[in-house]
Amino acid sequence: MDIIIFGATGSIGQNALEVIRSQSKNHSLQVRAITGNDNIDQLCKDAIEFKVERVVTASHKHMPELKDRLSSHGIEVCAGTDAILETAQMKSDWILSAIIGFHGVPPTLEAIKYCRTVAIANKESLVCAGKIANDTAKMYGTTLLPVDSEHNAIFQCLQGEDISTVRKVTLTASGGPFLNCSLREMENATLDQALAHPTWSMGKRISIDSATMFNKALELIEAKYFFNLNGNQLDVIIHPESIIHSMVSFHDNSTLAQLGPHDMKYAIAYTMNYPDRKSMPLSEIDFATQAKLTFQAVDHSKFPALRLARWILKTDGGLGAVFNAAKEVALDRFISGEIGFLDMTRLVEKVLMMPDITKLEYKIPESLDEVKNINSWTRQITNEIKLNSN
């Protein structure tokens, strides 16, 4: 099986390479190309280990070093966004879309045209361009598989089921590092506190998105497009143990749940082997020692990002792209120390309430260029907004 990994040096990409290592002894797996950004040491190491044909760095400044370090290995070295798009056009059996943020949207949409199966960890591709992604997949006969643990769980629960019999889909959330904190404590939360996720090991940006529950808000929108659901069918519940990843309830009031340790390698391996299930050297849940599974309702006053997502779920327009762009800028401003932790949601809501933005509520983007324009315009607006100090 020929494989391409976008975002190979990130958390998801590294987990995918670990899955490939564990399966390559028994299965014919060939990593044809990998892409990364600034982690040149890891990019070189993985390129040599997996004997890839092509390595791409998003940053042109790393091109000379990459060429020098890989010159004796017969590996093609490229740089820049155009090179990433060209890599998406390489024929392959399985592509992992794991570039973080909006930067991952164009190569994902391009890969759908050329690859038999695209495993999507870049949730922004569906949040910002869900209709375009689904229409393109249908046109080219491409299978889209979800890598996010919650959507992967939903996908597994729906195997052999008629989607018309689904009453409700419930995504679980750990609650993050601030689950038991007061609003006052969250108001003064530091970057280090936001990065301290209690169960999952993730990269910097997604850890903060988890702390605000912006990550879960994006996942709600992603689920709408992945499974052709409406907003009334989607819900979130707090599950601190992160053992149940999602639940699907049917009209007969029965519920199926998918359980597993909080390790992304399970979902990655599932999509890599689908529709088969292959043995993996991963731990399993010991139900005899798993003390308890607990649940609690979401406190929307502490996590208002989910309230904003509910509004977007009611629309079919370009607000998903607006929401994501505003969120990404707010995150940048928090990381830089310009705004506080709770200011991120305030800033995004302020953008969404602007008259020019609300006009996009029912205007469905028809092309990637339209999505890019919405993204650029929203980023500019979000960067210009000044928040009142409390």
Image: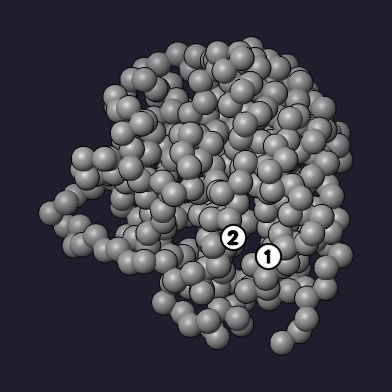
Q: Estimate the x, y position of residue 147 in percent, counting from the top left.
A: 48, 36
Tag 2 and tag 1, C-beta contact below 8 Å: yes
Q: Is residue 344 above or below residue 310?
A: below
Q: Which residue is mark 2?
A: 308
Q: Is residue 202 above or below residue 60?
A: below
- Is 87 displayed left or right of 237 in the figure? right
Q: Quadrant of the C terminus?
A: bottom right
Give the mark, 2 or 1, whose residue is nearer the N terminus.
2
* Quarter of the figure with residue 204: bottom right
Q: Is residue 104 visible?
A: no
- Dot 1 falls on a residue whose secondary structure is helix
* Quarter of the figure with residue 311: bottom right
Q: Estimate the x, y position of residue 164 in percent, counting from the top left.
A: 36, 31
Q: Is residue 314 above or below residue 6?
A: below
Residue 58's label in the rendered image is none
Q: Which residue is mark 1?
A: 349
In space, the residues marked 2 and 1 are separated at their CA atoms by 7 Å
Residue type of the residue flagged with mark 1: Glu
Q: Is residue 274 visible?
A: yes
Residue at the far left in the pictured view: 288
* Quarter of the figure with residue 340: bottom right
- 153, 223: nearer the viewer: 223
Residue at (43, 21) in percent of width and height: 24
Residue type of the residue flagged with mark 2: Leu
Query: Alpha-carbon neighbours of circle 1 within 10 Å: few (<14), some, or many (≥20)?
Result: some
Residue at (72, 50) in percent of width and height: 322
Residue at (55, 73) in percent of width and height: 193
Q: Estimate the x, y position of residue 201 in percent, counting from the top left.
A: 48, 54
- Is 233 displayed left or right of 282 in the figure? right
Residue at (68, 57) in percent of width and height: 327
